[in-house]
Amino acid sequence: MDEVPEPLDHFVLATPDLDATVAEFARRTGVEPAPGGAHPGLGTRNHLIGLGGIRYLEIIGPDPDQPDPDEPRPFGIDGLPEARTVTWAVRTADLDATVARARALGHDPGEIRPMRRRTQEGHELSWRLTRVGAAHPSGVVPFLIDWGDSAHPTSSDLPTVRLLGMEAHVPDPAAIRPLLGAIGVGLDPRPGPERISFAVDTPNGEVVFD
């Protein structure tokens, strides 16, 4: 596994069956993910696991308590045959400036959109992010996220496993490196079929997710 880039905010483990994936994560690691909350209008909800520091894993899937959304659920959830790590996010304190700098370097991270969700305790979290998959459909090029004045999910004392490293594979790494460099991400993808994987240290030993 490679060293994890400093600005990593979170990985996204998307699934067509949230309850089953949460149970499988708990079985493999010995740690139970915490309920996060629902994303109104998107038809999704999530569970969270801290990865140490200001980093976490989001397990996201359909929310049976919401009606089907007008648009497809995010992260390609509606078309997933099984759970997989679909992408990751890097944190920035000034999203507009980061996007402008990336565009000046020839990489457009995509449009910025506001998001929100309500926690299990009833608190509303809000953030802004760039459109997922705008840069590269593989998800290897991360989207950008800015939490602004909102509390970060890791501030809620999440159950935690320690992140050990990550890897990214794409058929043509040379085409991806300039995009990563434009947003200040020091990750060197390896050649191979498109895949993101990460390893965590757990009570059950080292576990790899991809």
Image (cartoon, rainbow, N blue to C red):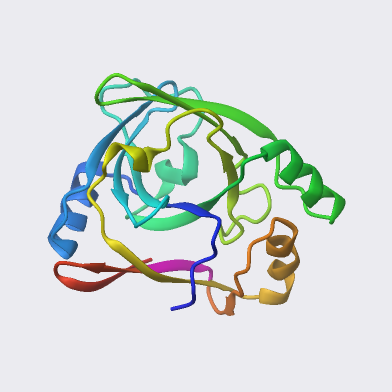
What percent of the width, then of the height, locates residue 25?
Answer: 21, 57
- Left or right: residue 136 compared with residue 126: right
Task: Residue at 55%, 56% (x, y): give it.
Answer: 7
What percent of the width, then of the height, locates residue 75?
Answer: 48, 45
- Left or right: residue 183 compared with residue 188: right
What percent of the width, then of the height, locates residue 64?
Answer: 26, 28
- Left or right: residue 161 compared with residue 172: left
Task: Residue at 46%, 25% (x, y): give it.
Answer: 116
What span is in magenta?
194-198
In front: 95, or 40?
A: 95
What percent of the width, then of the height, locates residue 160?
Answer: 25, 54
Which corner quadrant of the image does residue 174 belong to?
bottom right
- Left or right: residue 97 compared with residue 116: right
- All told, the count of numbered labels is 0
Q: Quadrant of the C terminus?
A: bottom left
Residue 176 drawn above or below residue 141: below
Task: Residue at 14%, 70% (x, y): give it.
Answer: 204
In front: 25, or 164?
A: 164
Which corner quadrant of the image does residue 176 belong to?
bottom right
Residue 139 drawn above or below residue 79: below
In front: 149, or 20?
A: 149
Q: Quadrant of the N terminus?
A: bottom left
| Magenta residues, dominant SS class | strand
